[in-house]
Amino acid sequence: MYRSPLTDITTQKRLALALIVVATLNALLWSFVGRPGGGGPDEDAHFRTVNTMVRTGALAEFKGYPPGKFSGLAIRAQVAHEITPNALAIPVAITIAVIGSNDYAFNIHVARLFMVAVYPVTLWFSFLTLRRLFPDIPVAPIIGVTVMSTVPMFVLVHSYYTNDAPAIASSTIATYAIVRAVQSGFTVRDIVLLGVSLGIVGLHKYTGFLVFPATAFVLTWHFIRQPKRLVQVATAILLPAAAIASWWYLRNWILYGDPIGVAFTQAAVDASGGAPVPPRSRGYSPTEFVEDTNWIAENFATFWAGHGQHRIKLPSAAYLALSSLMAAATLGLIVGVVRQIRSRRLGINFPVLAVMAAMHLGLWTVSFWSSYTVDVALHGRYVFPTFLPFLVLIITGLSSITDWRGRFEAVVLMILPLMLAANSAYFIHSILPDVNY
Amino acid sequence: MSTIDMEALCRLIRCHIQRLAFASCSLTSVVWLAIIAAQPVHIPVHDFPEVYRPSYTQVLSGVKGQTITPRVDGLSRIDIWARTDIKAGDHVTVRFDLKRDILSDSDMISGTIVFDRSSQHWQVRLAFDPAYISRDEVVYLRMESVLSSPDSSLHYAYFGGDLYSHGELLELDRLETPDQDLRFKLYRDPQFPKPIAWLEAAIVPALLAAEKAKGPPAWVVATLMIAIGSLGCLLVLSISILAARIFTIRHRNEATVALLLAITAAVVAVIAGPEAPIGKLWVPLS
């Protein structure tokens, strides 16, 4: 009988750890070569908030936009950086206050180290989650970690200062906590972990917030026949989450009269004058908006790669391969779900799978809607907080049409170094000429 | 022959086929790696970012050229890109001159190439003595083409905007349309012999980028890159051993070596593929 060498937990763990170390060092290298303030989208704007915190010794406060701030630009702000929660900015600011200098470049390189530091956390929790979800496919967690370590845009968001990396990390930890809780039947330990992780999510960028409805869904699914227990567990999860995160929203409420800050920011954007009018307000239909902005292709392209101001993409052959892979996974996913429904055997992972699909596709929907109705911004990285659910869907889909055991597992393993090589090739042939130009 | 004998024979044949497969895989990989290793090493010092898509300009006057000012010493190679549309039996002869003065032919180095078939993706590599050009010295790359028949055509990749501020694209040795540049890539000679030169080629562009980004000192970046490379090699080795264990029970050593070589060859193809001699034309200038 076939037995994968990766069923040995130590081997699997060591391989994953080696990949995580390589990925983290790689992100560190990328952070070293990124132009200060221009390492990635909005780096300068995010770092300005940190600078304010360093200068004033307090959290940055939004004072409105100067006149004509968005005049002539294609996009407008969704939520001001001072209002969007980003708790990791606090230790960043404290560190810069302690060891920083007057040199902008030095400070920004210090700030980037925090982004690099959260990368292994994301990778490790993704590994743990995938290991729990695919115990019969020992290569699955390794593939997941490798994909996360090699997708150029995913590496890039962990190499420049922004609020994306902590949102991804907190959302990934919460996703892990959801999976653990579902599999264990919501033990006290898992309830606490879920509550704390949701609290951390609450203190970071809103793109991670789909874990809240996801938690509500799995709770309801699990305790549908025990309403009293449902209320108890929900309260037990909400209490630590609220204790950790509520102060931020109270602060927003007190300062701006708007806990979330979208309405307040939009009023400020309009007041600055000359800002672009959102497509929906201009009477564009969603179809027209998608066609005019090339929304689908641009999002798909920048999900994988988009370095620098000009969003340098991958070679077209790479996109063709990725599209084929995703088409195969989608087909497999449909086949797998139909099979499960027809056989009336919904496994323990079914609600988890439904949640993963809802989180990932839901975030795409939210990204589209906010782009269409508010800020006109579009970028594939906005859905990165649900990168782990995306991987779960891909692996599940491929599992329906392939057998991961035997030689196929060996071939998959052999592809991993090629993925690392492809990432290096993007760095050498795309990023370095762009930076050195 | 008994059933047992037949089974043993089949096993033996299968065993030999497997060994043969591993041996041919190893051999192919070694040949590929040797081809790449035999290529001369040059350190890239100037390139246009991928985001700028070049256009193609047809050579109608017969002479095009580009002035170049290298920002480093030891420039040893210039790559240019061309397209040819050549009818059967025709050919296009191109003479490349590199000179210090646009109007004078003294102190000039030259090389000639003949295109006798059509292609959309010619990458012409002009290699020359690194002592010929000094840092910040203006040189003129002149490309004079002679078509054997007017039915054939030659086009060079160029940029319609002024993307290279240290030179211009010229027509008939004159500036006809300002703010245009030939698509080219510059390389300098490595400071170390092979195999350290490979390391130099991989590390130097990153060091330059880190310096521009006011990142940490060069030794930190270099150490980091070496650490990533070493860990990457260890990963390749581990994966080869694991994959070999899955592939075969009997010939694990042969399988490990074969897979290690195959993965290494594939990794080299992905990273250093553009340096492979396939589809490239070397033109030594002397």
Image: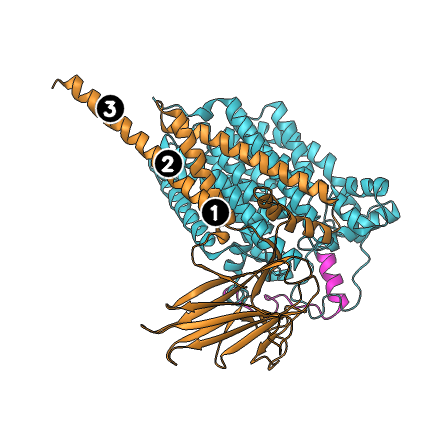
Chain colours: A cyan, B orange
Mark in the foreground, 1 or 3: 1
Number of residues whose C-alpha sits closer than 10 Å to that of mark 1, classed few (under 14), some (14–19) or many (20 or more): some
Whole-angstrom CA distance, mark 2 to mark 3, is 41 Å
Q: Which residue is mark 3?
A: B11
Given the image, what chain letter belongs to the residue carrying mark 2?
A: A
**Position of B164 relative to B243 (above/below):** below
Instruction: Mark 1 and mark 3 in contact? Answer it, CB < 8 Å.
Output: no
Q: Which residue is mark 2?
A: A340
Q: Which residue is mark 1?
A: B36
Q: Mark 1 belongs to which amino acid?
A: Ile
**Secondary structure at numbered mark 2:** helix
Residue A377 versus residue A211: which sits nearer the camera? A377
The number of numbered badges drawn on the structure is 3
Whole-angstrom CA distance, mark 1 to mark 3, is 38 Å
**Secondary structure at numbered mark 1:** helix
Query: Image point 38% across, 30% down: which residue?
Result: A405
Q: Quadrant of residue A289?
A: bottom right
**Residue A74 placement (x, y as % from top left):** 65, 66
Number of residues whose C-alpha sits closer than 10 Å to that of mark 2, classed few (under 14), some (14–19) or many (20 or more): some
**Position of A228 relative to A305 (above/below):** above
The residue stretch that appears in magenta: A263-287
**Residue A99 placement (x, y as % from top left):** 84, 40
Q: Mark 3 belongs to which amino acid?
A: Arg
**Residue A298 placement (x, y as % from top left):** 53, 59
Q: Mark 2 belongs to which amino acid?
A: Gln
Have a look at marks 1 and 2 and say if they share a chain: no
**Residue A50 placement (x, y as % from top left):** 79, 48
